[in-house]
Image: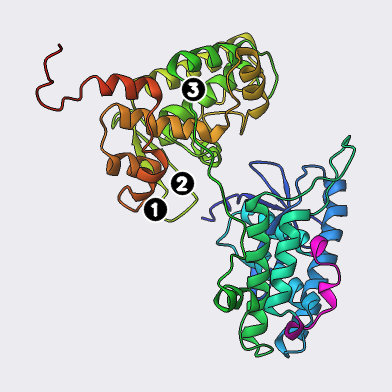
């Protein structure tokens, strides 16, 4: 007896290299780059739009393949090396799409701040030239002018500058691999002069809202209507971040079937590293939160029988992927300093530490595999109210009698 063929998550179309993802409805381009198959999202569920974007992607891929010949034969200019670097980045299936976007953005910043670099040969990119470019970049930036601004923006953040320097180093490493130059001038720069090539990163002090402020923040979010994804859903989304320590990108991957009620655990499908997938306790307040979400979905389904409750085991717990607009509006209404999604992860770690949980355990819940070194550096701070309460418990022997 012939068994029916099992449906895959990919649906073929009449257009070569164009496929549709069944669960999301989004279209993807499938190409082979540097011997590896790469799936590129076209960011649309409309077939006509997908066809147009596929043509653009295909033209870009073919252009990247053409420059690879010059790189392989050791005759590459910086233009060829840059295109080869972009092709490697797109072909690397081990890095996240956000990382791909960041690397390609760094290349754009190089091109904007070093006019004519594409026409240079690798030997012409000397350590002094690299230093002069970096110094100019730090002061002048990309001269990007935001909409409505009267003048271009001067300078760039340390992260923007340093990521561009890293990208240039990786681009020139390709010339070293092919024997066009002996050493990478970006790496050699510091050894030759002892000066700082990268821009110094000044870490801002982390200021977290108090528990009273958090209560006010969540109340404001719930009363914020549909801004940024819905008030109640957005508030519970942030509560989940705060009670689980999940990264923003992990929440859409957390399905109902990953809530292990009997074992009192939540399986967070981490993606940042091999060890970031982890189990965190289903804390009592977290369990109450998830039951509340279930009840709200059931209630909504009763009022709208044709609608979906989004409570199947394979459904994500939350229907939104972010809600920064709602957070911003709530912060403004309550007078609280603006916070981001990631700050709720800071709050999770800080709350656990304040509650007496040891650092290595907190590090494991966060998906770190260094035994707590990073957690101690990043989350070892305490909020002022907790610090003052803890200070009252400190005793240094017998205090001298008051005169």
Closer to us: 390 or 324: 390
Q: Percent from the top left, x then y, of residue 345?
A: 46, 34
Relative horizontal placement of residue 319, taking residue 387 as reference (left or right): right
For mark 3, give the secondary structure: loop
Gap in angstroms between the C-alphas marked 2 and 1: 8 Å
Q: Which mark is on residue 270?
A: 2
Looking at the image, tell me whether mark 3 or mark 1 is earlier in sequence order. 3
Q: Percent from the top left, x then y, of residue 372?
A: 32, 47
Looking at the image, tell me whether mark 3 or mark 2 is earlier in sequence order. 3
Q: Looking at the image, do the residues carrying marks 2 and 1 touch, with CB atoms under 8 Å apart?
A: yes
Q: Magenta span covers which residues?
A: 111-124
Q: Percent from the top left, x then y, of residue 325?
A: 68, 26
Q: Is the stretch drawn in magenta largely helix, strand or loop? A: helix
Q: Name the residue under label 3.
A: 209
Q: Mark 1 points at which residue?
A: 275
Residue in view at x 74 percent, y 75 percent: 129
Relative horizontal placement of residue 317, taking residue 10 as reference (left or right): left
Relative horizontal placement of residue 214, taking residue 174 as reference (left or right): left
Residue in view at x 67 percent, y 55 percent: 102
**Is residue 343 a member of the stretch shown in magenta?**
no
């Amino acid at each position: 007896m012939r068994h029916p063929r099992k449906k895959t998550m990919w649906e073929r179309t009449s257009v070569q290299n164009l496929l549709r993802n069944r669960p999301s409805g989004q279209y993807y381009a499938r190409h082979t780059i540097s011997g590896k198959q790469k799936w590129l999202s076209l960011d649309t569920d409309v077939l006509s739009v997908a066809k147009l974007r596929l043509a653009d992607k295909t033209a870009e891929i073919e252009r990247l393949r053409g420059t690879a010949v010059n790189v392989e034969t050791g005759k590459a200019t910086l233009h060829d090396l840059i295109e080869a670097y972009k092709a490697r980045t797109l072909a690397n299936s081990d890095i996240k799409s956000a990382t791909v976007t960041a690397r390609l953005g760094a290349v754009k910043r190089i091109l904007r701040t070093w006019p004519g670099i594409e026409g240079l040969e690798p030997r012409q990119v000397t350590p002094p030239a690299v230093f002069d470019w970096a110094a100019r970049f730090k002061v002048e930036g990309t001269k990007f002018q935001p909409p409505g601004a009267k003048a271009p923006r001067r300078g760039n953040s340390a992260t923007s500058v340093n990521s561009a320097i890293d990208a240039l180093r990786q681009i020139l490493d390709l010339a070293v691999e092919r024997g066009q130059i002996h050493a990478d001038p970006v790496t050699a720069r510091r050894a030759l002069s002892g000066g700082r090539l990268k821009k110094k990163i000044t870490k801002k002090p982390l200021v977290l809202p108090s528990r009273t402020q958090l209560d006010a923040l969540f109340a404001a979010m719930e009363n914020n209507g549909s801004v940024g994804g819905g008030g109640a859903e957005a508030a519970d989304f942030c509560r989940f971040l705060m009670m689980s320590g999940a990264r923003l990108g992990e929440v859409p991957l957390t399905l109902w079937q990953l809530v292990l009620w009997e074992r009192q655990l939540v399986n967070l499908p981490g993606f940042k590293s091999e060890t970031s997938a982890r189990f965190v306790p289903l804390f009592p307040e977290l369990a109450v939160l998830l039951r509340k979400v279930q009840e709200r979905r059931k209630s909504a389904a009763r009022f709208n029988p044709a609608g979906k409750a989004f409570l199947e085991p394979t459904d994500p717990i939350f229907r939104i992927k972010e809600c920064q607009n709602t957070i911003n509006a709530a912060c403004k209404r309550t007078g609280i300093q603006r916070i981001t999604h990631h700050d709720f992860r800071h709050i999770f770690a800080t709350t656990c530490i304040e509650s007496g949980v040891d650092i290595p355990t907190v590090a494991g819940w966060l998906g770190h595999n260094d035994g707590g070194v990073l957690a101690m550096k990043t989350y070892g701070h305490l909020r002022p109210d907790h610090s003052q309460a803890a200070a009252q418990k400190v005793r240094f022997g017998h205090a001298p009698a008051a005169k």
